[in-house]
Image (tube, rainbow, N blue to C red):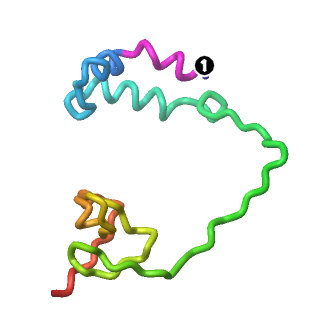
Amino acid sequence: NEFQDKLAPHEFFKYRKQGIEPSEIPEEVRADIINMVLNATEEELFTVTKLENFHYEPTKGSFNKVKCEVCGEYTYERYIRVKDGKKVCITCAGHKIDEFTVETPKVK
């Protein structure tokens, strides 16, 4: 869209095309592109259209549990990952703990 065209020549993407991680790009370059996005209007950022013949059906929640094949912890199946062909919990899958991850202590 037009906003992406506006961002494309920004210096930030020149760094990214060289394989430089965002955290390694100079702060002033990162701050500038972040401010461009934060200061953009909704009209610049989003295109909203009605989808014909679309019917939304929410996914039903499941309380089914699966036993992690590494640590033996029971985990709700929506949180199970497959690693090396095994059904494993998020921790055993090697996912890093971040601000969005709620970790419960393992019972030994």
Q: In the rendering, at what x and y percent does residue 35 appear?
A: 42, 30
Q: In the rendering, at what x and y percent does residue 44 appear?
A: 62, 27
Q: Residue shown at 44%/73% (left/top)? A: 77
Quarter of the rendering occupied by the N terminus: top right
Determine the image quadrant of residue 13: top left
Q: In the rendering, at what x and y percent does residue 49 appear?
A: 76, 37
Q: In the rendering, at what x and y percent does residue 7 appear?
A: 47, 19
Tag 1 secondary structure: helix
> Left of 79 or right of it: where is 55?
right
In this picture, which residue range is highlighted in magenta? 2-10
Q: Main secondary structure of the magenta part?
A: helix
> Left of 104 or right of it: where is 61?
right
Residue bearing mark 1: 2
Quarter of the rendering occupied by the C terminus: bottom left
Q: Residue shown at 67%/65% (left/top)? A: 58
Q: Residue shown at 57%/74% (left/top)? A: 61
Which residue ends up furthest to the right in the rendered image? 53
Say what amino acid the circle numbered 1 marks: Glu
Which residue ends up furthest to the bottom in the rendered image? 108
